Image (cartoon, rainbow, N blue to C red):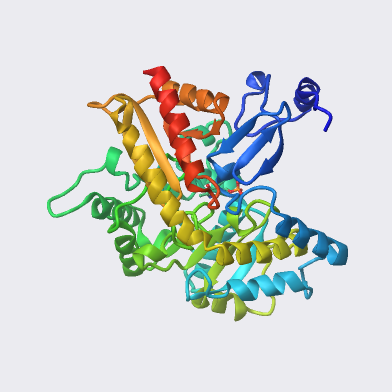
Amino acid sequence: MTPLDNAALQEQDKHQLHPLQHPKTHADPLVIERGEGVYLITADGRKILDGMAGLWNVNVGYGREELAQAAYDQMKRLAFTSNFAGMTNIPATELANKLSGYAYPDLKTTFFTSGGSESNDSAFKIARYYWKRMGKPEKFKIIARKLAYHGITMASTFATGIERYHKMFGPAVPGFVHVPPPYPYRFEGEIKEGETVGTAAARLIEEAILREGAETVAAVIAEPVQGVGGVIVPPDDYFPRVREICDRYGVLLIADEVITGFGRTGAMFGLTRYGVQPDILSFAKAITSGYQPLGGNQISDAIYDTIQTAPDTDSWMHGYTYSGHATACAVALRNLELIESEKLVERAQTMGARLYAGLQSLKEFPFVGEVRGIGLINGVELVSDRDTRAADPVLAAKVMKMCQDRGLRTRNVASTLAFAPPLTITEEEVDEIVRILGSVFDSVS
Ligand SMILES: Cc1ncc(COP(=O)(O)O)c(C=O)c1O
């Protein structure tokens, strides 16, 4: 193959405005040419182990012929058709049928979007409409957690609990209230006698509901594991208590499983391990392992009934051009077959345990504050001082860059290096992650 002209590619890239990047510092982007398994190959011929599975989504790994074939077959037959107002297509019907009760037994109906932000926006609209139909139109507020990431549409931006995403785009969309997350390493709240971090963090949700007035609160939204906020894994007693609180005050629970859905945590869906069912689920990312943009919501029967039995004048006035996109749905169906037949959920457990143990072995470095994770979503939080736990964003950025130069891609999320590789990763590749990170830690020590 003729070598690619990396410099020319970088030059033409100047016509792109990139997400999460200052244009001025976009001088020499890493140009990715292709992917194979867990590896990315750059235009200048370097091989990088993708410790982030793209953006936490390429669960079946890169270069899967099966998914290319599924897209090819569907595109030849019917790439796209409207899913609006009396029409549907075959892959969308098959996928909706497959997903019925797939994540949680009580969630049987799916609304399709093209990604996670759209799914969360849709979740808020579903919650609002539900309460209107229940005769409580004043219930519109959403309680979210600090350090939550829910996306970048207007509503999901302000559901997000990370200031940097708000600063450029205010005034804030009203109705979003944030409470501290269940973050044992940095819990902000008071832990009262008899409480754990999990139950204290859940109490903060209860207090927020009471402060705002339960009659004004539509839903609580939560990621089972907070990814972008720093790979925050909640204590086991948190979500069961949150569910109880939501039930007590008549508040819906929205699970944002955009990262945790489809195997990432070593369970097919993140809340199943706590025996908790949400009322609304948001999914995206790994439904297609990133081979096509697709997302959606699943809703409980109670919610679906309110939409189904709406007055004849109330058609469901919400939908995207690409809701139920035929090619995306065909790819999703094949992707789910791969996740199931290759037992990737179980693999996330075994490889996750190996990765976690390997990362734990790096705790000897004084700047490692905490190593945490579940399944194949892990984080190594860097601090400048272990006693004060002061975060070290500068070191985290430096380590991330050095890892990349040595052939490992990680992401610095809130001074935590995130590791969420494809679920197809082998033992040797897990060990390679730990070895490269360890060598970088040695160099910066
Ligand atoms: C938990 C969570 N929710 C929502 C989103 C937004 O998804 P998208 O970027 O597909 O709009 C993300 C993206 O990373 C996410 O991590």
Q: Is residue 15 left or right of residue 369?
A: right
- Residue 22, picture quadrant: top right
Q: Give the residue drawn at x 38%, y 50%.
A: 353
Question: Farthest residue in the front direction?
Answer: 428
Query: 49 above or below 382?
Result: below
Is residue 277 or residue 175 the one in the foreground? 277
**Where residue 305 appears, x then y in whole percent?**
55, 79
In which quadrant is the C terminus drawn? Answer: top left
In which quadrant is the N terminus drawn? Answer: top right
**Where residue 101 appears, x then y in whole percent?**
52, 75
Q: Give the residue drawn at x 20%, y 52%.
A: 196
- Residue 170, picture quadrant: top right
**Where residue 388 appears, x then y in whole percent?**
24, 26
Q: Is residue 334 left or right of residue 386?
A: right
Question: Farthest residue in the right direction?
Answer: 76
**Where residue 39 appears, x then y in whole percent?**
62, 40
Q: Is residue 198 left or right of residue 434?
A: left
Q: Give the residue drawn at x 60%, y 32%.
A: 20
Query: 210 above or below 228?
Result: below
Task: Using the rendered image of the protein, determine whether residue 11 is visible from the camera's viewpoint.
Answer: yes
Query: 402 above or below 430?
Result: above
Task: Using the rendered image of the protein, determine whether residue 143 is visible from the camera's viewpoint.
Answer: no
Is residue 379 or residue 405 the one in the foreground? 405
Q: Is residue 376 left or right of residue 85?
A: left
